[in-house]
Image (cartoon, helix red, strand yellow):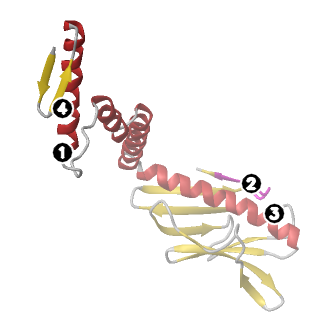
């Protein structure tokens, strides 16, 4: 039996072999047609490869959780800032100053030199008395600071004195003179009371 497929002539002596030959000839034709395709043609991406690329460019569950946590923190901080009480801010500033007073008293005893607290416009500073007079302190603890808590004014009262003082002096002895320092703001006042034993309380 003879089969003519284009320029190819195949001689087969069995019908089964003839069918197989036709299949091989057809496959060969498709291969040639594929060879004639443009060498610059882009390969066809498989569906699985496209799915992998899409997964890689998306957000993972962990990334989404991190974004949600950060967003929640920002919302909480904004809410706290909007709901702060000016009265609370003033009391916190008085508490901070009371702790600085206690530290200044301890430093005066350790250095064996009196230390003074001096309120200023917009802030305050601590000075230490030396042989050359009062010298501003520049260390991290008693360095000059700006007012916080909306403080607009200060009064210093020593019991038994008929006039207001301009500074608070911390002596070199453990027992000092009682004093009252009042901070004023637009919402009220807060008073720091020193009883002379080196401790200060806010009222």
Q: Secondary structure at mark 4?
A: helix
Front residue of this view, candidates 36 and 64? 36
Front residue of this view, candidates 150 and 189? 150
Q: Secondary structure at mark 1?
A: loop
Residue drawn at 76 percent across, 74 percent down: 115
The residue beneath circle 3 is 106
The residue beneath circle 2 is 199
Residue drawn at 20 percent across, 38 percent down: 32
Of circles 1 and 4, which is in front? 4
Q: Earlier in the sequence, mark 2 or mark 3?
A: 3
Q: Earlier in the sequence, mark 3 or mark 1?
A: 1
Q: Earlier in the sequence, mark 1 or mark 4?
A: 4
Res. 29 mark = 4
Q: CA distance from mark 1 to mark 4?
A: 11 Å
Q: CA distance from mark 4 to mark 2?
A: 102 Å
Which quadrant of the figure has residue 108? bottom right
Residue drawn at 81 percent across, 85 percent down: 130
Q: Earlier in the sequence, mark 4 or mark 2?
A: 4
- Range of residues picked out in magenta: 195-201
Compared to residue 125, the image places residue 92 above or below, namely: above
Front residue of this view, candidates 122 and 175? 122
Side of 115 where 193 appears, left or right: left
Q: CA distance from mark 2 to mark 1?
A: 97 Å
* Neighbourhood count class around disc 2 (C-alpha, 10 Å): few under 14, some 14–19, many 20 upward: some
Q: Which residue is situated farthest in the bottom direction here?
A: 132
Q: CA distance from mark 3 to mark 1?
A: 95 Å
């Amino acid at each position: 039996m003879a089969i003519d497929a284009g320029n190819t002539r195949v001689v087969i002596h069995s019908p089964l072999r003839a069918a197989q030959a036709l299949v091989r000839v057809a496959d060969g034709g498709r291969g040639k047609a594929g060879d004639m395709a443009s060498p610059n043609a882009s390969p066809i991406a498989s569906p699985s490869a496209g799915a992998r690329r899409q997964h890689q460019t998306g957000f993972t569950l962990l990334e989404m959780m991190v974004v949600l946590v950060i967003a929640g923190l920002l919302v909480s901080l904004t809410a706290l800032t909007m709901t702060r009480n000016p009265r609370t801010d003033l009391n916190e500033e008085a508490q901070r100053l009371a702790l600085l007073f206690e530290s200044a008293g301890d430093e005066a005893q350790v250095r064996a030199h009196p230390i003074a607290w001096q309120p200023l416009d917009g802030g305050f500073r601590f000075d230490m008395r030396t042989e050359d007079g009062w010298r501003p302190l520049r260390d991290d603890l008693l360095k000059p600071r700006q007012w916080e808590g909306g403080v607009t004014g200060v009064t210093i009262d020593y019991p038994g004195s008929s006039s207001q003082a301009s500074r608070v002096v911390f002596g070199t002895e453990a027992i000092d003179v009682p004093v009252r320092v009042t901070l004023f703001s637009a919402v009220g006042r807060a008073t720091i009371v020193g009883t002379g034993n080196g401790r200060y309380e806010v009222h």
